[in-house]
């Protein structure tokens, strides 16, 4: 389904904005869940609020005619790091990612898989096991650009570089060349939020994430986003392929997962701006900016 005469979602809580879009499909409130609670019962008081810049003349969160509802839902979900899914009963779920999107929140391990048949004989990995550290996903420089929520003429820029990732071959995540990530997002909305996001990204994106795939006996309770351990290493399951054959009496599940690591101490300097060095500067034109 696609938008026609989209409403403006500026200043709305993201969860409620997504629910409004979902209801356009004809799905009732009783079929919409936030973190496994019915929408009417969920506590959204701390949910992320979209910026309120100039919604009457230039709304930032209004979708052009022809934009798919799915595209809009995913855009909002990504801003607040939420997972979107339907359960077997057709209920729509907007859920926080177990363990947090970058592994920085509390989580519960649901299974412990191993290649050691003495430690966990009933959770053995069979047939295949592969693991790797994905260096291609590493960056060694991050720059974040945003605008002030109250006054969009004020632009904030924060940035950081991991010199060890460029110059030190013994450093984990070493590339030997500069690879920069640039984020331009008005929804961040303040210097403090930009610094917080920069610290969050640099602590993880300077390190190659761990990925693996393995095969084990099938479990009907296994679903994507559950967190398990594989040889004691936490892994968030992202993909499950199930093979069931009654004639051959087999029930196998091939699973793929990943885990983000925190940067090691001393790999990169902390962001500690000097006093008075981050006062916003209001100017005119495309070049206006305040940097740290």
Image (cartoon, grey):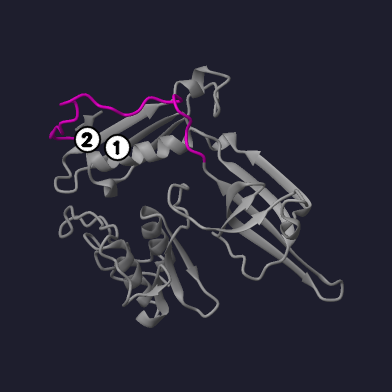
In the image, residue 254 sits, relative to residue 184, either above or below, namely below
In the image, residue 186 sits, relative to residue 75, either above or below, namely above
Residue furthest top as drawn: 167
Q: Where, quadrant-wise, is the C terminus in this rendering?
A: top left
> Alpha-carbon distance for marks 1 and 2?
22 Å
Residue furthest right as drawn: 248
Tell me which segment is drawn in magenta: 261-285
Label 2 residue SS: loop
Which callout, 1 or 2, points at the residue further toward the start of the chain?
1
Give the image location of residue 140, x and y in percent: 46, 28
In the image, residue 32 lies in the stretch drawn in magenta: no
Q: Local crowd at mark 1 within 10 Å, few (<14), some, or many (≥20)?
A: many
Residue picked out by circle 1: 195
Label 1 residue SS: helix
Residue 146 disc label: none
The residue sitting at 63% across, 47% down in the picture is 232
The residue sitting at 19% across, 25% down in the picture is 277
Residue picked out by circle 2: 286
In the image, residue 273 lies in the stretch drawn in magenta: yes
> Image check: 288 left or right of 48?
left
* Quarter assignment of residue 51: bottom left
> Image check: 177 left or right of 242?
left
* Quarter assignment of residue 228: bottom right
Q: Where, quadrant-wise, is the N terminus in this rendering?
A: bottom left
The residue sitting at 21% across, 37% down in the picture is 155
> Image check: 288 left or right of 117?
left
Give the image location of residue 36, x and y in percent: 43, 71
Q: Is residue 28 visible?
A: no
């Amino acid at each position: 389904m696609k938008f026609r005469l989209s409403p403006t979602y500026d200043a709305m809580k993201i969860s409620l904005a997504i629910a409004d879009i979902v209801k356009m499909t004809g799905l009732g409130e009783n079929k919409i869940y936030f973190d496994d609670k019915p929408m009417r019962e969920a506590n959204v008081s701390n949910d992320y609020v979209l910026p309120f810049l100039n919604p009457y003349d230039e709304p930032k969160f209004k979708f052009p005619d022809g934009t798919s509802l799915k595209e809009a839902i995913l855009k909002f979900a990504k801003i607040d790091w939420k997972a979107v899914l339907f359960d077997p009963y057709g209920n729509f779920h907007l859920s926080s990612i177990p363990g947090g999107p970058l592994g920085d929140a509390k989580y519960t391990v649901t299974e412990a898989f191993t290649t050691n048949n003495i430690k966990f004989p009933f959770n053995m990995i069979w047939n295949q096991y592969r693991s790797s550290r994905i260096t291609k996903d590493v960056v060694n420089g991050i720059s974040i650009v945003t605008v002030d929520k109250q006054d969009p003429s004020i632009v904030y820029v924060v940035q950081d570089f991991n010199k060890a990732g460029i110059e030190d071959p013994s450093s984990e995540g070493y590339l030997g060349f500069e690879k920069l990530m640039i984020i331009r997002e008005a929804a961040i909305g303040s210097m403090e939020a930009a610094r917080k996001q920069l610290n969050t990204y640099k602590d993880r994106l300077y390190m190659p994430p761990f990925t693996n795939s393995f095969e084990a006996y099938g479990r009907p309770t296994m679903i994507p986003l559950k967190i398990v351990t594989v040889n004691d290493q936490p892994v968030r399951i992202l993909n499950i392929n199930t093979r069931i054959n009654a004639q051959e009496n087999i029930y196998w599940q091939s699973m793929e997962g990943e885990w983000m690591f925190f940067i090691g101490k001393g790999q990169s300097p902390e962001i500690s701006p000097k006093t008075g060095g981050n006062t916003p500067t209001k100017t005119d034109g495309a070049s206006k900016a305040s940097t740290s």
